[in-house]
C-alpha cells in the first residue's frame, strides 16, 4: 500500500528509505499486536528465567567475600609461606638422607674390606694348618718307618 503526504510542494510519496521503512515497521508491529490473544494466559519464559537464575548464582559466587581478590591474595601468600616451610623441611631431610647414605656407603666399604681381610686371614690360617699337618705326617711317618 502506497503512502503519500500533502505538503507545500504538493503530494509527496512517503514510500522511501526513511519514512517508508518506519511506516512499514509500524504496520508490522500493528499486525503483531492485533494477532495476540490476550484472553489466554501467557506462557512463562522458563528458559530465560532459568538462565538468569544461573547467571545470578554464578555472579553471587564470584562476588562472594571468599572470592574477593584481597582474600585470594592472602590465601595465596599463606599457602606460599607453608610451601616454603615444607620445602625447607624436605631439603633438610634430603640432606640428612644423603649424609646417611654416604655414611652407610663408608660403613659398607669398611665391612667389605674387613671381610676381605678376614677371608685372607682364614686362608692363611688354613694353609699354615695344612702345612703343619703335612709336616707332622711326614716327620711322624718317617720316624716310625726308619725304626
Image: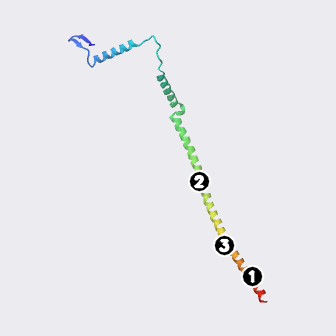
Of badges 2 and 1, nearer the viewer stands 1
Residue 80 position, x and y percent, is 54, 43
Q: Nearer the viewer, mark 3 or mark 1?
A: 1
* 2 or 3: tag closer to the N-terminus: 2
Considering every residue shown, the one lying at the far bottom of the view is 147
- Residue mark closest to the camera, 2 vs 3: 3
The answer for how far apart the CA atoms under marks 2 and 3 are is 39 Å
For the residues labelled 3 and 1, the Cα–Cα distance comes to 25 Å
- Label drawn at residue 120: 3
55 w.r.t. 119: above or below? above
**In 3D space, how far apart are the residues under numbered discs 2 and 1 (Cα atoms)?**
63 Å
Task: Give the label on residue 94, or none.
Answer: 2
Categorize mark 1 by other alpha carbons within 10 Å: few (<14), some (14-19), many (20+). Answer: few
Q: Nearer the viewer, residue 10 or 81?
A: 10
Q: Secondary structure at mark 2?
A: helix
Q: Which of the labelled discs sits on residue 137, or is there none?
A: 1
Amino acid at each position: 500500500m502506497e503512502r503519500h503526504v500533502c505538503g507545500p510542494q504538493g503530494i509527496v510519496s512517503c514510500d522511501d528509505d526513511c519514512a517508508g521503512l518506519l511506516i512499514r515497521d509500524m504496520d508490522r508491529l500493528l499486525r503483531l499486536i492485533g494477532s495476540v490473544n490476550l484472553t489466554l494466559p501467557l506462557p512463562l519464559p522458563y528458559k530465560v528465567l532459568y538462565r538468569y537464575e544461573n547467571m545470578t548464582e554464578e555472579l553471587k559466587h564470584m562476588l562472594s567475600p571468599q572470592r574477593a581478590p584481597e582474600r585470594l591474595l592472602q590465601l595465596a601468600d599463606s599457602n606460599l609461606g607453608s610451601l616454603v616451610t615444607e620445602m625447607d623441611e624436605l631439603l633438610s631431610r634430603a640432606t640428612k638422607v644423603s649424609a646417611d647414605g654416604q655414611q652407610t656407603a663408608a660403613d659398607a666399604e669398611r665391612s667389605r674390606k674387613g671381610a676381605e681381610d678376614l677371608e685372607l686371614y682364614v686362608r692363611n690360617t688354613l694353609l699354615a694348618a695344612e702345612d703343619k699337618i703335612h709336616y707332622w705326617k711326614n716327620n711322624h711317618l718317617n720316624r716310625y718307618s726308619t725304626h
